[in-house]
Image: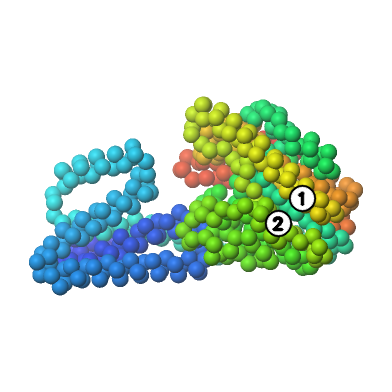
Amino acid sequence: MNNLKQKILAFIDSEHESPILAFIAIGITPILFYVANNYWALNSISHLLFFLACLTVFLVGLYVVYYLCFKTNKKLHKHEGHALFWFLVIGVIFFLTHTYFNSTLKRIFLLLALVVLWKLIPFKPRKLYKKIIVMLLLFSGLSMLRILIHAYEDIKPDTWIKQPDEIENVKFKKTPNVYMIQPDGYVSEQMFASSPYSAKSDLFSWLETNGYKVYNGFRSNYPASLTSNASLFAMKQHKFAEMLFPKIEMANGREIISTNNPVVSIFNNNGYQTHFIAEDEYFQQNKKQKIYDYYNIKKSDFPYLTTGGSEVRDVYKDFKKVFKPEDRNPKFFFIEKLLPHHVAFYNTDESIDAERLRYLSRIEEVNVWLKDIVTYISDNDENSIIIILADHGGWVGLRSFNDLFSNEKPELIKSIFSNIAAIKWNGNLSEGYDKDLKSNVNIFRVLFATLSENPKYLDNLEDDSSYNLKLNNLGYKDVIKSIDGKGNVVNILD
């Protein structure tokens, strides 16, 4: 360690300029930081090649400019140290204002801090820019450590997904078309009637009138789309995939949803054509999708750098393009609708009330959409199974994203997990097969037991508990059981 310190000091005191190292430092710092913070949306070979290409173009371009300015022009050569200093300062400011200092107030604070530093630190450009290089490389080292942790979680076996029986070899005796429609964040009827929603939706009575079985007291097993759907399509409780540092962006969640999962494999093995119709590219960000026969959003439709919402589709319109009731081959459709969605966060009592009203307004909008699409399906495919299943609750009543991980009020816990579940079985349900159906994780196991007319698959229903993350004293998150299998709010470490 002492030897390393001596080398760093020698580098800072050296009279030689270090343009290439400066370019590398300012080039890799934002890339590694971005990858460390968004690893599970970027963990593909194509993304690795993309970032390598970006870094190469950046470094070559900078060096060409540097060479033309300072190696071919003797007048500018003496200002090389000043230029490298200002280049790094501007680069660091740009990086900070787009990461940690991303609000007006924070940027004013950053400006004042830079002015103070300018007054306190002697202006020696060469030493200063080399110190900046050292700090950038140390910061990049921390980002690299986080990436290595994620990489370990990426390549280690996902043992949690292993099924307890041979359900992956199930053979269907009935093959109706199956439509799973997912209105994001739509809560159950009981939740609507209670605080903090205190409202009513006419959708539930409409569904019952039109032959749907509405499952009372239903809930998701996880608080957000990625974790909930990973469990849904794996038919297993993952408890955040045994991550070293559990996150909502769980390890390999996207791979399970859109790349490889037992549910779609089972449909494929039984001769089904499978369709993945999403409103945006969120589930497909890492560009790995391959298991479904059809995706309405292709890998080439959205950029490499996206947080979701770069490619927004009219899913009803996309569904109609591939809906062919005259085709007798059985089909499975997963259709995602990003309404009513969960509330936004502004951390005030007024915003909680306003977000509740906005949520209820979106309920009215999505009710019209749901009635329209399921009526269209029923009119054209009268023997199908139609599943309306939300991924989680609407989060109404929460103040902030951190409140999602810290609030222990029973009514707000239920607001996070309570979700709509309604199925039009059209005579396909075997009596009693769904008597223990209470949460998302067991939907497909019950469905497959019904289609195979084999109750043995019901012997291995998963525990219906709902899991969340809780902030600990170190600022990290622990996995907790928020609701037990009987529906009691418990909030205990798992």
**181 and 19: which is toward the camera:** 181
- To which quarter of the image does residue 106 belong? top left
Q: Residue at x 37, y 41 (%)?
A: 103
Q: Position of residue 394 (x, y in %)?
A: 62, 38
The single residue placed furthest to the bottom in the displayed view is 72
**Relative to 387, residue 349 above or below:** above
Q: Quick check: 342 left or right of 8? A: right
Q: Amino acid at mark 2?
A: Lys
Circle 1 crowding by C-alpha within 10 Å: few under 14, some 14–19, many from 20? few
Quarter of the image for the C terminus: give it. Answer: top right
- To which quarter of the image does residue 410 belong? top right
**Relative to 376, residue 288 above or below:** below
**333 and 454: which is toward the camera:** 333
Q: Position of residue 75 (x, y in %)?
A: 9, 66
Kindly indicate whether the residue at mark 1 contacts the one at mark 2 (C-beta within 8 angstroms). yes
**466 and 39: which is toward the camera:** 39
Residue 87's mark? none
**Earlier residue among tags 2 and 1:** 2
Give the residue pinned by disc 1: 376
Q: Quick check: 105 left or right of 321? A: left
Residue 320's mark? 2
Element assignment for label 1: helix
